[in-house]
Image (cartoon, rainbow, N blue to C red):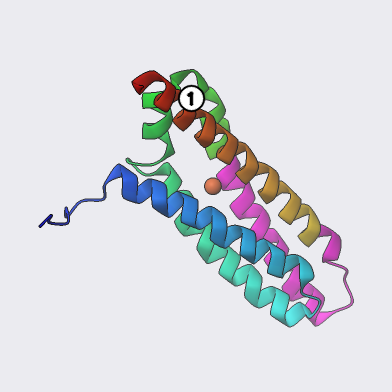
């Protein structure tokens, strides 16, 4: 019987990253279809927690850098740009959260910013998914 390794294996991280993309997609769908601003604020809180953990997994020692280094090192510059996006995206989530709190205290429109945030996150995640798929496809092609 196989024993589970104590340390995080690259496959576990890949599974965590893909799982994060699925959870994020569901959360963004909820975010865009929720009208109640108090509920929106709750979901933004969930988004902040999910993204923090998701980005941590992607940037971990067994995360995207290792996968891309091994399979598509020519994409490392692009990956660094995506990692730089992580900080900007988290700041944007925080900014939207602050504006939503402000809206709840007064009549301020936030829908456009939420939609813009969802668009940016979808584009970001789609680019990462494309990079990951191309990288893994390249690896499969090499090893067969
Ligand atoms: Fe991601």
Number of marks present in the image shown: 1
Identify the residue at image location x=81%, y=76%.
Answer: 35
Q: Is residue 94 visible?
A: no
Ligand 1 has an atom within 8 Å of the beta carbon of the residue at disc 1: no
Looking at the image, residue 35 sits to the left or right of residue 53; the answer is: right
Q: Which residue is mark 1?
A: 76
Q: Is residue 30 above or below residue 79?
A: below
Near mark 1 (Cα within 10 A), the count class, few <14, some 14-19 or many ≥20, is some
Q: Furthest-front residue in view? A: 144
**Helix, strand or loop status at disc 1:** helix
Q: Is residue 29 above or below residue 18?
A: below
Looking at the image, residue 104 sits to the left or right of residue 128; the answer is: right
Q: Horizontal and vertical percent for residue 128? A: 57, 39
Comparing 5 with 61, the one in front is 5
Quadrant location, the N terminus: bottom left
| Principal secondary structure, stretch drawn in magenta | helix
Residue 81 forms part of the magenta stretch = no
Q: Horizontal and vertical percent for residue 76? A: 48, 25
Identify the residue at image location x=59%, y=71%.
Answer: 45
Q: Is residue 42 above or below residue 26?
A: below
Q: Find residue 48 and report its image quarter.
A: bottom right
Which range is magenta? 85-113
Identify the residue at image location x=65%, y=68%.
Answer: 44
Looking at the image, residue 107 sits to the left or right of residue 62; the answer is: right
Residue 102 forms part of the magenta stretch = yes
Looking at the image, residue 142 sits to the left or right of residue 42; the answer is: left
């Amino acid at each position: 019987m196989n024993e589970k390794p104590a340390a995080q294996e690259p496959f576990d991280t890949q599974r965590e990253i893909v799982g994060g993309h699925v959870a994020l997609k569901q959360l963004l769908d909820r975010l865009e279809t929720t009208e109640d601003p108090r509920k929106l604020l709750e979901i933004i809180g969930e988004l902040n927690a999910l993204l923090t953990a998701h980005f941590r997994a992607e940037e971990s020692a067994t995360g995207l850098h290792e996968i891309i280094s091994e399979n598509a090192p020519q994409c490392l510059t692009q990956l660094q740009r995506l990692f730089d996006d992580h900080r900007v995206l988290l700041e944007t989530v925080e900014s939207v959260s602050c504006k939503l709190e402000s809206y709840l205290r007064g009549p301020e429109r936030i829908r456009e910013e939420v939609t813009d945030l969802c668009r940016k996150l979808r584009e970001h995640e789609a680019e990462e998914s494309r990079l990951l798929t191309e990288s893994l496809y390249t690896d499969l092609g090499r090893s067969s």
